Image (cartoon, grey):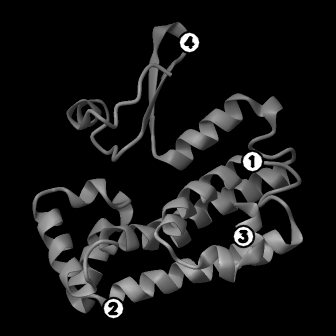
Amino acid sequence: VEEHLSHKPEELQKLVPSAKSLVLRVKAGHGKELLLTRSNVVLRFLAESRADAGLYGETPYESALVDQWLDFSFNSIEVPAAILGLSSDVSASKVGWMVLVAASRGGLAHRLPCSCSLSILHVWLQTGGAVVEAARGEVRKAVGVLDKRLTASTYLAGERLTVADIAVLCATYHVVLQGDKLVQDFPAFGRWL
C-alpha cells in the first residue's frame, strides 16, 4: 500500500473516478499497479491476500458467511446510518434541504454510498424528516439481527475474528457514538463491541 488519498479528493478522482473515499493502491507483478475502491472490497482483498490469517473464514461456508455479513453491513447498516449521519446535528425538517443543497453542490456523493445516493435523495424530497425515523428503525432492526446472531456466537462468521466483524463494527461505530441506546437495548451486540 503506497498511500491513503481520502484527504486529496482531486487526486482520488483522477485515479478512480467512481471512488468515494477509499482507494487501495497495490503493486502487482510485472510492475503493474492495482487500484481497489470500496471498503468491503478492500477488506476482501486484504483477507484473501493473507488466507493463512483466516480473516476470510476457514472453510468455503465461513467465507460465504463473511460475504453475507459484508453485504448485510452495507445494505442494512451503512445506508440508513448515512442518513442518520446527515441528520445528526440538524433538525429533521431541515435535513431535506441540507441533502438537496449538498446534492446540488456535488457534496452528497462523498457522504453517502454511491449506489443509493439518488434513491435516498428522492426519498428525502418525498418524505422530509420521516426518513430519519425510518433510517433509525432500520438500524435498530439490523442491530437486532446482529444481537440475535451474537447471542449464539462470539463472532459473526465462524469461531474467530473475520473481516465480517471488522466491517460491521465500522458500519455501526458512528451510530453508537451518536448516542443511540443500541448497546443497552441489545446486550450481545454491546458485548461484541
Tell me the residue that label 2 is attached to: 130
Tell me the residue that label 3 is attached to: 189
Callout 3: 10 Å neighbours few (<14), some, many (20+)?
many
Direction top: furthest residue: 30
- Labels 2 and 4: the sequence-earlier one: 4
Q: Which mark is residue 38?
A: none
Q: Which amino acid, mark 4? A: Gly
Tell me the residue that label 1 is attached to: 162
**Quarter placement of the C terminus:** bottom right
Viewer-side label of 1, 3:
3
Residue 81: give x, y in percent of width and height.
45, 69
Describe the element under mark 1 as helix, strand or loop: loop
- Labels 3 and 2: the sequence-earlier one: 2
> Quick one: 191 or 144, which is closer to the camera?
191
Tell me the residue that label 4 is attached to: 29
Q: Which amino acid, mark 3? A: Phe
Viewer-side label of 1, 4:
1
Alpha carbon separation for disc pair 3 and 4: 42 Å
Residue 186: give x, y in percent of width and height.
70, 79
Callout 2: 10 Å neighbours few (<14), some, many (20+)?
some
Report whether 165 appears left or right of 125.
right
Alpha carbon separation for disc pair 3 and 2: 26 Å
Q: Which amino acid, mark 2? A: Ala
Q: Is residue 104 above or below residue 28?
A: below
Alpha carbon separation for disc pair 1 and 3: 16 Å
Describe the element under mark 2 as helix, strand or loop: helix
Residue 159: give x, y in percent of width and height.
89, 53
